[in-house]
């Protein structure tokens, strides 16, 4: 059965998510719908990108991913469809796609399909669901859009190098209160060229990377590259973000030697 | 595949919802189960009605909707099954059905099916799931119930006219803290006959309807008919219910000129 | 369609649960995945056992249940697969299986399948999903493991008899704030042999069992054997755990006469 996933900031309390699902099932009865998350903070494309980036590689080819975060279109942020590694992604070109992939997409189109609803404020249900069902049925991007050369970039969310320092920021705090940064293992390799480094944030400094949470004693701070390849600040069986008073957007600096 | 949806106050923490799903899947393996919401506040049929009323029109014909809110039956509130616009609804006749539909149902029956569980306190799993699977399989209401002329009314939840005023109340606060009232666009048309009106609540008064959240500057109060056709009080990118101190049940008055 | 259920402490905010689902769907497209709960408190196998124990009997034969709580394996807590009453269970042998079943399993194997992921910290996705798909396809436990004589016991979580008293503890607080103990109806029958008893906790004492929440007036304390057969302390339409200041692990004593 074809698979359509949903990543939204719609929450689980309201009727919105189920209306999207009803719309999909009405068009494509034999589909499997998977919730990636509906708890993305409103308009937070950075968190949406981190969650989906780490989830989609587990899905098989042909899966269609709907991104219902900041989904309104404008001249600058049209609705687009993307093919990457055999999977499809649909959303507004609000910058999220530049955070989602490490490689150049195989195909990008600006969606041209219209919708028949009176309500212009719910593109996830009225436009994305329609496009997703078309793709999940085996339809092509060409039939629902016109080619587009690239996606909008969100450079402000990328780490920067300042002299011998690499300065990143906190992009995600998981449900265990582990703190995830936008500094990836591949970037550190590229910038650091094998040099050692200290990790500084607030008044803290960590001198040594751990491999797992259990590398330090219970309650101690650690830094490690997590399963997603991102630098993570954590405490063994503790709540790092709370106890260290760390928040989304806070700066983390790597000082290379 | 047939579709069965669930609208309950059972929450996501306990085993109840999954027991209902297991029971459904045991009777009808090829069913798609969709969660409308399990976060309806306990016994709150008004909120359940608002959520389901806005969700079910997105579902295809033949869908069966289970309502597991205030689900215990009594002589006054029997378990019933309803057919409206090709979709089925199952629940206790506790007044919710008078809030759910704008039209007279095509068919209403009082359920006569028994159940074989020892536990008399879980009708959603033991009775509604059985009835829903029967209907989802293509079975008829006649086979599981006896005809019933109408449903219980909940007049207290309806807006009232007082002179030139239309007085309604807050029936729902969504996850964005937008405030939804029981005053609908069609009611305003009927009562107002095209006259202008001011909207008064607490110490606030709004003189002009907006069409979208962006019609006012960020942080400003607005009133509009939402996608569901209900009058909604909101703030552009703000949390109306918190900042205006509005709660479920609070009065909203339309003063016609 | 085959059914795989998930009981985890992964929460709904992060990407973990959807990665597990993507992995399952990639291996077995025609599967129905049911969430039992993802809100088990971290490492709390007692709560996971209570929730799953009350949910799995509602599922049909052939269902495969993945337990993603305390899922890391060690020499003492290997990954195992179990067959009980025609249903399969997969998890780490951390003691949870001794809390889950009232009968001796029909078959127990220690899993021998390997996985191809680089990430050693996510057995639910990388090992349990693989084993579950094998079983859901109709495969046998023998093919993915070697026989094991029994499971690890967690005696500390069992009630004890002290003279004429039976002393248990609070193992679960549901979303209505009802308090569930590990004292079951069958244990009381066995120990009490029909004698009357008082129920003591904190400074409270209850002399009479109720049959339903409505047996006492609104706001009054009651004790009853719940649908799951466990002794439960509740208040009719009230929040027992909050108002009586009861917490997980607190002692409840039955004084037999």
Image (cartoon, coloured by chain):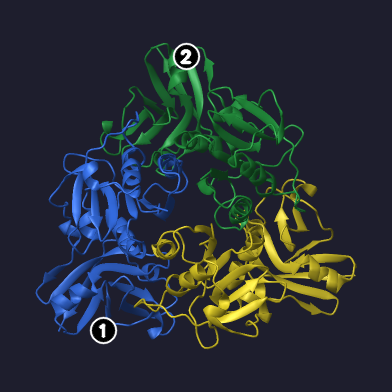
Chain colours: A blue, B green, C yellow
Q: CA distance from mark 2 to mark 1?
A: 72 Å
Point out the residue furthest to the left here.
Answer: A163
Which chain does tag 2 point to?
Answer: B
Image quadrant of residue C198?
Answer: bottom right
Q: Left or right of C109: which side holds B254?
A: left
Q: Residue at x 76, y 43 (%)?
A: B114
Q: Is A247 rendered above or below residue B236?
A: below
Point out the residue furthest to the bottom here.
Answer: C75
Which chain does tag 1 point to?
Answer: A
Image location (x, y in percent) of residue A241 = 36, 68
Q: Mark 1 = which residue?
A: A207
Q: Residue at x 41, y 61 (%)?
A: C18
Q: Residue at x 50, y 85 (%)?
A: C74
CA neighbours of label 1 inside 10 A, class few (<14), some (14 to 19), many (20+): some
Q: Is residue C142 visible?
A: yes
SS class of the residue under badge 2?
Answer: helix
Q: Are marks 2 and 1 on the same chain?
A: no
Image location (x, y in percent) of residue B176 = 39, 43
Image location (x, y in percent) of residue B132 = 62, 42
Q: Quadrant of the C terminus of chain C?
A: bottom right
Q: Is A216 rendered above or below residue C140?
A: below
Q: Is A213 rendered above or below residue B143?
A: below
Image location (x, y in percent) of residue A36 = 39, 56
Front position among marks 2 and 1: 2
SS class of the residue under badge 1?
Answer: loop
Q: Mark 2 = which residue?
A: B191
Q: Nearer the viewer, residue A208 or C129?
A: C129
Q: Are marks 2 and 1 in contact (CB under 8 Å)?
A: no
């Amino acid at each position: 059965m074809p698979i359509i996933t949903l990543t939204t900031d719609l929450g689980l309390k309201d009727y919105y998510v189920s209306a999207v699902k009803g719309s999909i099932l009405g068009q494509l009865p034999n589909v499997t719908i998977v919730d990636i998350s509906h708890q993305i903070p409103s308009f937070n494309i950075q968190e949406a990108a981190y969650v989906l980036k780490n989830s989609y590689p587990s899905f098989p080819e042909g899966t269609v991913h709907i991104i219902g975060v900041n989904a309104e279109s404008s001249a600058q942020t049209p609705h687009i469809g993307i093919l990457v590694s055999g999977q499809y992604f649909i959303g507004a070109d609000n910058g999220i796609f530049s955070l989602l992939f490490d490689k150049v997409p195989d195909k990008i189109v600006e969606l041209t399909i219209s919708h028949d609803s009176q309500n212009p404020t719910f593109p996830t249900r009225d436009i994305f669901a329609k496009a997703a069902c078309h793709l999940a049925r085996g339809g092509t991007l060409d039939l629902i859009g016109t080619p587009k050369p690239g996606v909008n970039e969100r450079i402000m969310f990328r780490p920067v190098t300042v002299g011998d320092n690499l300065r990143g920021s906190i992009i995600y705090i998981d449900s265990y209160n582990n703190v995830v940064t936008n500094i990836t293992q591949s970037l550190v390799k590229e910038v650091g060229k094998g040099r050692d480094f200290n990790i500084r944030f607030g008044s803290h400094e960590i001198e040594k990377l751990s491999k797992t949470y259990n590398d330090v004693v219970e309650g101690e701070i650690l830094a490690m590259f997590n399963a997603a390849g991102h630098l993570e600040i954590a405490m063994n069986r503790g709540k790092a973000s709370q106890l260290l008073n760390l928040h989304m957007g806070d700066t983390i600096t790597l000082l290379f030697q």
